[in-house]
């Protein structure tokens, strides 16, 4: 089996595990952690897709103009890498915000069960 195909299957398993955790857990803290697992797996998928064209980092070296260094392998696509850096920062900030909100909610109900916060439209 192709190593890229195996990694894709493992990453898909991580995405599905995180998504299943989002659906099955009732604890808010576990939901945030499952969302983080899903986001990390999606980041890994994008990195894997960016590495399909090659594994060398697109950084210029001192021998950039040297024709002997041109045949050392294909370059990795830098666009998914830049997008992923942005996604990692946004995901981290969302997770930090959610954990602060959950910490504040734990003062109301320490079990953090989703049903205990449901007001049913009543105030």
Image (cartoon, rainbow, N blue to C red):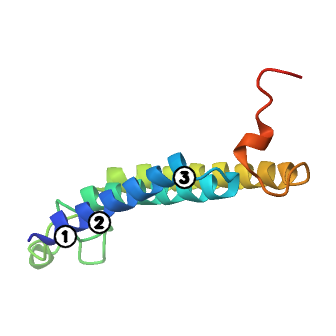
Q: Residue at x 33, y 60 (%)?
A: 13
Alpha-carbon neighbours of circle 1 within 10 Å: few (<14), some, or many (≥20)?
few
Q: Residue at x 45, y 51 (%)?
A: 20
Q: Residue at x 50, y 50 (%)?
A: 87
Q: Earlier in the sequence, mark 3 or mark 1?
A: 3
Q: Residue at x 73, y 50 (%)?
A: 113
Q: Is residue 61 left or right of residue 123?
A: left
**Which of the pair 27/47 is nearer the observer?**
27
Which image quarter: residue 3? bottom left
How far is the residue under mark 2 from the one under mark 1? 39 Å
Taking 68 as reference, is 60 above or below it? above
Alpha-carbon neighbours of circle 2 within 10 Å: few (<14), some, or many (≥20)?
some
Q: Is residue 71 left or right of residue 22?
A: left
Quick one: SS at disc 1?
loop
Question: Disc 2 designates what residue?
Answer: 10
Q: Earlier in the sequence, mark 2 or mark 1?
A: 2
Estimate the x, y position of residue 77 in percent, counting from the top left.
26, 56
Quick one: SS at disc 3?
helix
Q: Which mark is residue 35?
A: 3
**Which of the pair 82/99 is nearer the observer?**
99
Which image quarter: residue 56? bottom left
Alpha-carbon neighbours of circle 3 within 10 Å: few (<14), some, or many (≥20)?
many
Question: Disc 1 designates what residue?
Answer: 65
How far is the residue under mark 2 from the one under mark 3? 17 Å
Taking 120 as reference, is 95 above or below it? below
Q: Earlier in the sequence, mark 2 or mark 3?
A: 2
Q: Is residue 90 left or right of residue 76?
A: right
**Which of the pair 90/54 is nearer the observer?**
90
């Amino acid at each position: 089996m192709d190593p890229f195909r195996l990694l894709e299957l493992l990453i898909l398993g991580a995405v599905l595990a995180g998504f299943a955790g989002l659906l099955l857990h009732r604890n808010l803290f576990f939901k945030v952690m499952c969302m983080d697992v899903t986001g990390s797996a999606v980041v890994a998928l994008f990195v894997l897709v960016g590495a399909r064209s090659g594994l060398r980092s697109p950084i210029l070296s001192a021998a950039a103009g040297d024709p002997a260094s041109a045949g050392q392998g294909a370059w990795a696509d830098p666009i998914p890498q830049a997008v992923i850096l942005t996604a990692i920062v946004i995901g981290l900030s969302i997770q930090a915000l959610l954990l602060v909100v959950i910490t504040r909610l734990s003062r109301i109900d320490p079990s953090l069960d989703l049903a205990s916060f449901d007001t049913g439209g009543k105030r």
